[in-house]
Image: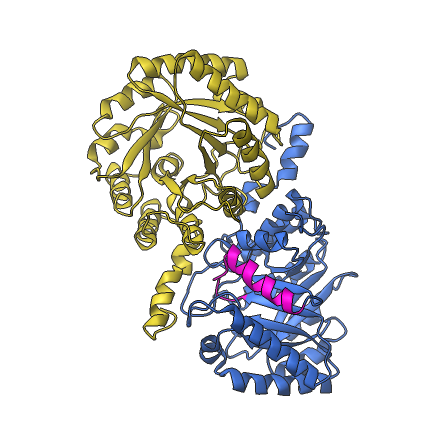
Chain colours: A blue, B yellow
Amino acid sequence: MSDLPSRITITEEGPREGFQIESGAISTNRKVELINALSHTGLSAIQVCSFVNPKLVPGWADAGEVVNAIQVVDGVTYTALWFNQKGIERALQHTDKLTLAGCIHLCASEAFGISNLHRDRETNLQAMRQQTINHQSGGIAVTKISVMAAFGCNFSADVPTANVLQAVDDGFNIASEHGASINEVALADTMGWATPSRIVAVTGAVRERWPDVPIRLHLHDTRGIGISNAWAAMQLGVDRFDTTVGGLGGCPFARQPGASGNIATEELLLLAHEEGIDTGVDINALLECVALAEDIVGRQLPGALLRGGNLERYRQAARSGHGAA
Amino acid sequence: MSDLPSRITITEEGPREGFQIESGAISTNRKVELINALSHTGLSAIQVCSFVNPKLVPGWADAGEVVNAIQVVDGVTYTALWFNQKGIERALQHTDKLTLAGCIHLCASEAFGISNLHRDRETNLQAMRQQTINHQSGGIAVTKISVMAAFGCNFSADVPTANVLQAVDDGFNIASEHGASINEVALADTMGWATPSRIVAVTGAVRERWPDVPIRLHLHDTRGIGISNAWAAMQLGVDRFDTTVGGLGGCPFARQPGASGNIATEELLLLAHEEGIDTGVDINALLECVALAEDIVGRQLPGALLRGGNLERYRQAARSGHGAA
């Protein structure tokens, strides 16, 4: 375990992932309430919304209103997600609050891209070239490569590591063509296929080929073993993770109603803190956000820690002579 | 990961752990229905009930009726739990179906023993000496040592590894005094304090001192990181685990209403199978038991795989040309 990082950085994606998939309408005010609460937990980055087609994702029809209403906190980076020129234009209206970074989105599984983005590999590469131009025209630096379905795919099943390397290579080629400087490669377990060994194989192969580029992992807990994947990644020294408060979100792909969302922020915090890894986040404040998120969506979220109880609370009680706080 | 076992053995404790804690009354017939279904999944061991005080655990007032009604399947070992002479006597009425093994129960945290068993260490040791005599008088061989709160305690917080070694040593001393031959030491994360590093430290210390005695882990998922603990244990070569179908159960200790139960059988199966570790269990048949268990208890259980979907199903669909089965 010698490669464990001393600190990991978490990007909280609960608002963006969660509110795009919840079935009932959630008011703008309540979305803002959660984002504002998350801003005071010590998190350094929060992805607050998606600028996507409101007909396809009605949950984010009010993305602009949400950004207008949030109260930004110093030291917190607020980001958003978009996939086309229209989204870029909407995001550009919020540069007072949002930090905009252009991303080159790729699929390690062509079957996933065809099914969900309606693009084969070549069509997507062409779209990403155009989007890179669009980003740069808007003054948005293209700094990220993100690979979806990097560990497996509900449509094509196992994804060879070579496909992931090809996708990352495609991304660097597009960046190079347009003079973009990439500072992060994100590997997304979009449909929850990762296992510890796949984390080791894929992350290791990407790092071996591009040793100087930091790797981010975006892990879903679709099948309940996401936290073991995060642990395997930390043992390799991976120090950037996307998570969602309470495990908000789901798997909008491939007919999986009710599937779990991303790995829960508070569970990754607990694992990190107990293993001596700093996160900068106050786990008790984050647990208050879990309770708030459950109140907002009207259901119990997958994260277990809210009901299990933070270990530090029990330590404090034991020290004060009152066990089982 | 060179110590990964080629095969692990799972003891399914869902019926015993689950039905003792569910709030609503569950009929004897439905308990039997779940146990019978579990018997046809390839599981080699199922803990079916507790012979405990029905005033304290009303959910198991019908333990005898349940055992009478289950249909035993060749190759499956059926076990039960008890803590006193009355329990021994009840268990002895079912030797036609149950495999009875005497266990010496110890606590690595004295505070836990005082709070939950109303016994300090010395009192418990005396009780275990008497229970060993009672077992042997009933013709039940004493073959197991089980250490509760082996990784931490809601009452005393962190548990030193030395306390676990002391508890195991106490167990071997009692066994030795009574000529009992121990063939397994179980370490229980009774209140969900384990982390990967604690698994490595405690399991390693026990194995170093008693290298020839197999170690079993009984892991709870109280705080959501149980599967990462199981993965850490498998990497050490631990090959015996207690789990519960769907993650049935809870944490009856220390005022944790709604806390998650044991690690989910199906999630450990998925992790094992995907890592090339044999379990002998048909994961699809087990998932049918998860659905049955949810129907019986009337709520969604914590295990994510039922909704996430077994990966093999997607592989088969991809091979047949129909992705996202």
Q: Is residue A61 visible?
A: no
Q: Position of residue B127 (x, y in %)?
A: 44, 14
Q: Position of residue B297 (x, y in %)?
A: 35, 45
Tell me which segment is drawn in magenta.
A189-210
Image quadrant holding the C terminus of chain A, namely top right
- In the depicted structure, whether residue A39 falls above or below residue A267: below
**Looking at the image, which is closer to me, B213 or A89?**
B213
Q: Is residue B147 visible?
A: yes
Image quadrant of residue A180?
Answer: bottom right
Q: Position of residue A16 (x, y in %)?
A: 59, 67
**Looking at the image, which is closer to me, B310 or B271?**
B271
Image quadrant of residue B196?
Answer: top right
- In the depicted structure, whether residue B133 falls above or below residue B41: above
Q: Position of residue B42 (x, y in %)?
A: 29, 46
Image quadrant of residue B53?
Answer: top left
- In the depicted structure, whether residue B145 falls above or below residue B131: below
Give left or right: position of B131 versus A284.
Answer: left
**Chief secondary structure of the magenta span?**
helix
- In the depicted structure, whether residue A92 falls above or below residue A39: below
- Look at the image and say whether residue A292 sits in the magenta stretch: no
- Look at the image and say whether residue A209 sits in the magenta stretch: yes
Question: Residue placed at 61% from the left, 72% from the top?
Answer: A146
Question: Residue placed at 65% from the left, 81% from the top?
Answer: A173
Residue located farthest toward the right when viewing the structure as drawn: A74
**Looking at the image, which is closer to me, A102 or A67?**
A102
Question: Residue placed at 59% from the left, 67% from the top?
Answer: A187
Give left or right: position of A85 versus A304.
Answer: right
Number of numbered discs: 0
Give left or right: position of B267 versus A131.
Answer: left
